Amino acid sequence: MEIKSYEDMAWQLGINTIETVHRMKSSEFVTLGEEMLKAAKLIQNGGALATQGEIYEAYQRCLRLMSYLQVVESMGLISAAEYRDFEIQILSLTQRLQSAYKTATSSETPQC
């Protein structure tokens, strides 16, 4: 009885994992990449993430992307070296976003 239960659970976990990877590949994972490219194009064309809200959203996208990449790497879909490359890029970007957020905060705060 216990073996059958374990087998059922293993099958269900395997199916859920594959479905999750498929969703990541086909929906939000792609959307995250597209949103990051839009922000990059905006900045490249002289625009800026002007409000705290825009900066915060960009920061949140970085964190979500990092979470997805951790899962993908742990499943062996990308190598540890590829993950490290992504991680370095994301951490660099989040540091810049934190600085931009602090700058936006200080410029929006009225000075006495």
Image (cartoon, grey):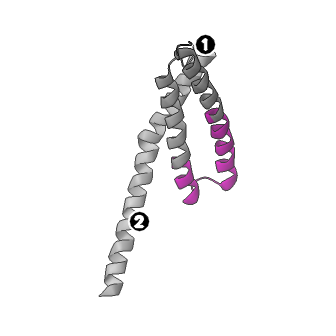
Q: Position of residue 37 (x, y in %)?
A: 55, 27
Q: Position of residue 75 (x, y in %)?
A: 54, 60
Q: Position of residue 10 (x, y in %)?
A: 39, 72
The stretch of residues the image draws in magenta is 68-94
Taking the image as shown, residue 18 lies to the left or right of residue 81, namely left
Chief SS of the magenta region:
helix
Mark sitting on residue 79: none
Q: How many residues crowd mark 1 within 10 Å: few (<14), some (14–19), many (20+)?
A: few
**Would residue 83 be counted in the magenta stretch?**
yes
* Near-viewer residue (98 or 4): 98
First of labels 1, 2 by sequence position: 2
Task: Look at mark 1 in the image and give the residue it sits on.
Answer: 45
Q: Quadrant of the N terminus?
A: bottom left
Q: What element carries label 2?
A: helix
Work out whether residue 76 can be spotted.
no
Look at 42% across and 58% down and name the residue there.
Answer: 18
Q: Where is residue 74 in the image (x, y as percent from the top left)?
A: 57, 59
Report if the CB atoms under discs 1 and 2 are less than 8 Å apart. no
* Near-viewer residue (78 or 57): 57
Task: Look at mark 2 in the image and give the residue it sits on.
Answer: 14
In the rendered view, would you say 40 is above or below 6? Answer: above
In the rendered view, would you say 40 is above or below 94? Answer: above
Query: Three-letter amino acid code at disc 1?
Result: Asn
Q: Is mark 1 on a helix, strand or loop?
A: loop
Query: Three-letter amino acid code at disc 2?
Result: Gly
**Would residue 54 be counted in the magenta stretch?**
no
